[in-house]
Image (cartoon, grey):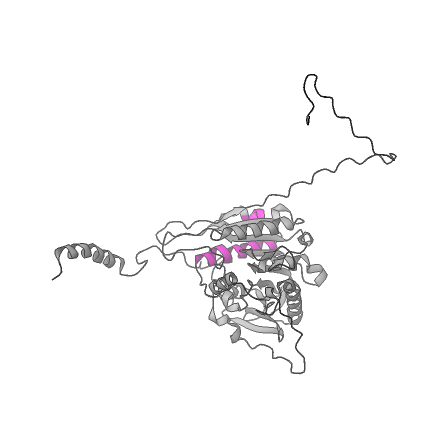
Amino acid sequence: MPSLTRICLALPLALALAALGGAPGAGAATPPAQPKEGPGGQAYSAAAVVKRALGRAGAVTLAYYGNGAAPAQGRPVAVMLHAWGAVNPQAYGAWIEHLARSGYLVLFPRFQEVGRTRPVDASGITAALVKDALAELATDQDAKPDTGRVALIGHLAGVPLAANLAAHAKETGLPVPRLIFGAMPGGIARDDKARGIALHDLNSIDPATLIVTVIGDRDARAADIASRRVMRDASAVPTDHKLMVRALSDDHGFPALSATLASPAGGNPAYDVAQVKLPAPDPKQKPAPFKWSADMTLTGEQTVLVGQINGAGTDSLDYLAYWKTFDLAAAAAFSGQSATSLKSNPRFIDMERWSDGWPVRRLAVETPRPPAPAKPAAAAAPAAASVAPAAPAKPAAKPGSPARGQ
């Protein structure tokens, strides 16, 4: 028979397990669900989503929009630019579905072929894919893109890509975006020879563009530096059109909310690229010459991150920190408002409450500092002077003290 000591030790543990239902997190507060309506909510205008592949083999853009006729003014366009290596739209399927059923035409350009595309070529490839997709859909009455309302959504390396697209919009024939929305900015290279996406001259971004970045508090340093770099380099955009948002992790209940680099992703198997019939390659067309370089491959760290992105689910951070934030930012951008309207809106930072009534940690917002004024240039010498004036003589040493250096 078991000893009395063992029974006494086991009894409290058994009672605790019984109280918790024997399951991890049982009895703990649960995080808020997706809102029934409003920004980030599920009061959708479409019951299903049309999925199409545009372009040609090796140069494909996936298009998504709600079933049924488009509104008379057309559909606003959201261009979703994936993280480096996360080329399957399934990883972002939950967000894509939210946007498409909310009325957007969503474009997902596949600008990267893993192991064959160099980062330095990604900006040009993306611009060509988006331009061709919009041209193909221009006369489609169901898709009906409204090129006056275009938003660019980037995740990680997709953020510098979005900034480059905005900077070159006019010269490449793309519509000028009204909003750049960067989730966890990253993957910025110092130049075209380094691994990552090098920023182009962002001073060309239209001053009316609204720029909003969202970073988390996990692995935050790199994303914070990248966010501030984009804000600083987009010098033509006024400070009141820029806003930096920070999503905060919260472990008050179960499951906990963790604002990691992968958290903006949210998988949906219905958006697996295999579910769409892709254009077949032309047998008469010879494949383009291929030259391998090391920056085409993923590093070990990138491979781990892509795995986390592909395995990400959806939770309150998606509904309230990313989807709702984008919905409100796009509404402000399309109506010509500044970021000040977002900062003053209490709903923008609200993350609702756990099931026990405890508030989820709210978003933190920050307006980036304006760039420091340039130092005044030294006064130019008079034009009539043909010889530079002689340097003034050094003052004599004080009586009784030795000159310096002696």
In the image, 302 versus 229, the foreground residue is 302
At which x and y percent is residue 184?
Answer: 53, 55
Left or right position of 284 against 94: right
Which residue is at 60% across, 59% downward? 196
Compared to residue 391, the image places residue 214 above or below, namely below
User: Within the image, what quadrant is residue 161 found in?
Assistant: bottom right
The C terminus lies in which quarter of the figure? Answer: top right
* Outermost front residue: 406
Viewer-side residue, 402 vs 331: 402
The residue segment tinted magenta is 315-342
**Is residue 44 found left or right of 162 in the rendered image?**
left
Prevailing secondary structure class for the magenta stretch in the rendered image: helix
> Residue 265's spot in the image, x, y percent?
49, 62
In the displayed orientation, state which residue is furthest to the left.
1
Q: Choose between 317 and 117: the one closer to the eye.
A: 117
The reply to whether the magenta stretch includes residue 202 is: no
> From where the camera sits, is residue 358 visible?
yes
Image position, residue 103 (x, y; %): 55, 64
Q: Is any atom of residue 334 visible in this view?
A: no
Q: Residue at x 60, y 65 (%)?
A: 294
Report the residue that reaches farthest toward the top: 400
Q: At which x and y percent is residue 181? A: 57, 56
- Residue in view at x 78 percent, y 35 percent: 379
